[in-house]
Amino acid sequence: MEAPPEEENWRDEQQQAAEDSRVFEPEEVESQKTVLIVYAHQSLGSFNQAVRDTAAKELSMQGYRIIVSDLYAMNFEANSTQDDIIAVFTVNVTGESLIMLLEYTRGICELKCQGDLKNPELFQYGEETLHAWKEGRLSEDIVAEQRKVEKAELIIFQFPLYWFSVPAIMKGWMDRVLTQGFAFSLEKMYNNGIFKDKKAMLSFTTGATESMFRPDGINGDINVALWPLQNGTLHFCGFQVLAPQIFWGPAHCPAVVRAAMLEEWSVRLKGLLLEKSLTFAPSEWFDLTFEQGFLLRTKVKEEQMSNAYGITTGHHLGKLLPPDNQTKAQLTDE
């Protein structure tokens, strides 16, 4: 398995890029399209920062407004707790009702209370944040990130691969920002999801070589590792998921190879938003009822019987996995 940290800092190579990173959030211009980069790396001058900066510069040149959420620099809270719910109190003042919003979180207020929970005896984060979202009672840091998501046409998640997934601080961002109601509901999910008109993608570095993530490599097929994030999080919320940008083992590469990686990324960025998204099974192929278990419709199963490969990495139907289903967009319609 792959343990952090997976790369060294490249301070000498990226010093100028680090200095330029302050300019990535210009004033908003009405009708200007926005790209949000959710970034998770602890070190100034890292290769991940170079990748982030390359995206910010290239997309800025294309006219996009770039917003960067630098999670470590923001000291973003990764824990999902009832501190994410703002308490509402009604106090009588000279006969009039005054509504006071007190955020009882992270040292802002010493008052400890249960807030306005629907079920204070058994705190259930998903249900409570759904109600809080509806009532405008989510904590300020969550609301700020949700506003960025609303503005963005594209979200790029930039990170080093930790334990076959995102760093904990980025997982916390997903848990806390993509709340029920705001990002998904039982009626609005997958290709009919709330963010179906937005695009999202993963861009990450690995500590392992590409061969180690092949189907016959020691780490197993990278497509399988990516399925929970790309289907279970991004596509579940409706995002059109672009193929990931994977930087294989930059810590083990000479400077010339790292420079070539960044140049390849820069070239891809020039046409990134015109790319086709990855292929997932449409929700319409499933019987979306509890009675039928949300299972693939019988007719669809019959139609798929003659295919040598499964539908997707996750919906393989006991067949061979479709090659590169989570790493390359399908170029032609079948």
Image (cartoon, rainbow, N blue to C red):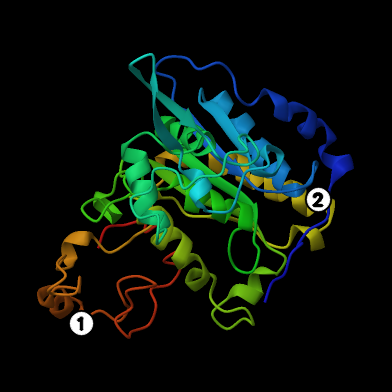
SS at circle 2: helix
Q: In the picture provided, is 113 more to the left or to the right than 97?
A: right
Say which of 256 and 99 sits in front: 99
Q: Is residue 316 above or below residue 246?
A: below
Which residue is label 1 attached to?
A: 306
Marks 2/1: CA–CA distance: 47 Å
Mark 1 Cα-neighbour bin, 10 Å: few <14, some 14–19, many ≥20: few
Residue that sits furthest to the front in the current view: 94
Question: Residue drawn 56% across and 44% down?
Answer: 112
Say which of 159 and 299 sits in front: 159
Location of the C terminus by quadrant is bottom left
Residue that sits furthest to the right in the current view: 12
Image coordinates for residue 313, horizontal then vertical, percent = 39, 72
Look at label 2 and name its amino acid. Answer: Val
Q: Is residue 271 visible?
A: no
Image coordinates for residue 159, horizontal then vertical, percent = 64, 52
**Tally of marks:** 2
Q: Earlier in the sequence, mark 2 or mark 1?
A: 2
Question: Residue drawn 20% across and 70% down?
Answer: 294
SS at circle 1: loop
Which residue is label 2 attached to?
A: 256
User: In the rendered image, which quarter is residue 16 located in?
Assistant: top right
Mark 2 Cα-neighbour bin, 10 Å: few <14, some 14–19, many ≥20: few
Q: Is residue 305 above or below residue 6?
A: below
Image coordinates for residue 108, horizontal then vertical, percent = 62, 34
Question: Residue drawn 63% across and 42% down?
Answer: 106
Image coordinates for residue 256, horizontal then vertical, percent = 81, 50
